[in-house]
Image (cartoon, helix red, strand yellow):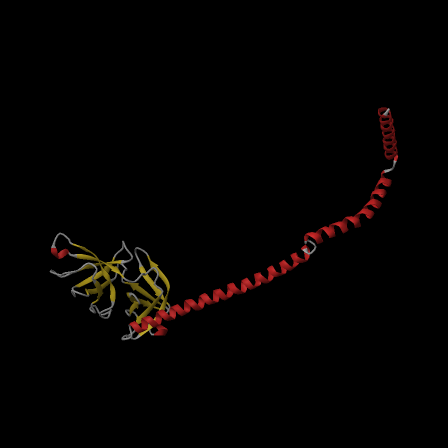
Amino acid sequence: MNNKKTGKLGIIITIVILILLVLLTNVKRSQIYTLENIVSKLVSPVQQGITFLKNKINGNNTYFADLEKLQEENKKLKEENSKLEQTLREYEVVKTENETLKSYLSLAEKYNNYKTVPAYVINRDISNYSKTIVINVGKDDGIKENMPVIADDGLVGYVISVTNNTAKVQTIVDSSSSTSCLTSSTRDNMVCKGTIEETNTLKGTYIANGANVIEGDSIETSGMGGIYPKGIHIGKVKEIMNGKNKTDLTIKVEVSVDFEKLETVLVITK
């Protein structure tokens, strides 16, 4: 009995659905759109209210306000960062200038028995065939040719040409340079010349018979030759090389000045 009732109910529902389908099929599309708009207007406020409550509960209601605030803070942070970078650059400039002044003072104190003019290197040509530097002082500063140039670590070279505001210096490691030297402990005389092969060593020649040159001994200017004053440090004996004859004794002298990094110098004017 129940099965018969269920079957009848199913048939009725099916008939109702078919009737609704037929009716909906015959309804104009514009009427459907109108119905959809009406339903949308009725449902939309409800949906917005539900979304607002949901965001309120989840803490998302201030998302856009917070986003604008973050964008403004980010802009301010970028501006502050730019100002800090500018300040840092200015600090580095001041720091460099301060270090340069300290170098000048240190040099002036070290060589206070000479009358000197401070300068810094503005150009360098430390290659195999030419080892010269250009400094930022010239005729207007009282600089003349053949004036010695020194650094904190020792002898640099001498002025070979001058303009009003610059001077070119031939370094002691230049292959055409010759410096009269002696060893600090044994006082043996020699002539130290620059070489083409290396930028930090000199070749010591014309060493007297019976000279007792010691490896590691300090080498300084002898005062002979008319350009360099006596007693300016040059470097140290790196290697002693004996030739076929005892008179062929030569040495390698490692210079103290790093010409590739040299920045501040003094020109001895008197």
* The C terminus sits in image quarter: bottom left
> Which residue is at a point 37% across and 70% down the rendered structure image?
102
Q: In this orientation, does residue 163 appear?
A: no
- Looking at the image, is 37 positioned above or below residue 60? above
> Which residue is at a point 57% across and 61% down the rendered structure image?
77
**Total numbered circles:** 0
- The percent coordinates of residue 79 (x first, y second) are 57, 63
> In which quarter of the view is residue 68 placed?
bottom right
> Which residue is at a point 31% across and 65% down the rendered structure image?
169
- The percent coordinates of residue 230 (x first, y second) are 22, 70
Q: Nearer the viewer, residue 32 or 260?
A: 32
Q: Is residue 55 left or right of residue 261?
A: right
- The percent coordinates of residue 261 (x first, y second) are 35, 61
- The percent coordinates of residue 1 (x first, y second) are 86, 24
Q: Is residue 81 left or right of residue 123?
A: right
Q: In this orientation, does residue 110 appear?
A: yes
Q: Is residue 67 left or right of residue 26?
A: left
Q: Nearer the viewer, residue 52 or 79?
A: 52
Seen as rendered, the residue at the extreme front is: 1
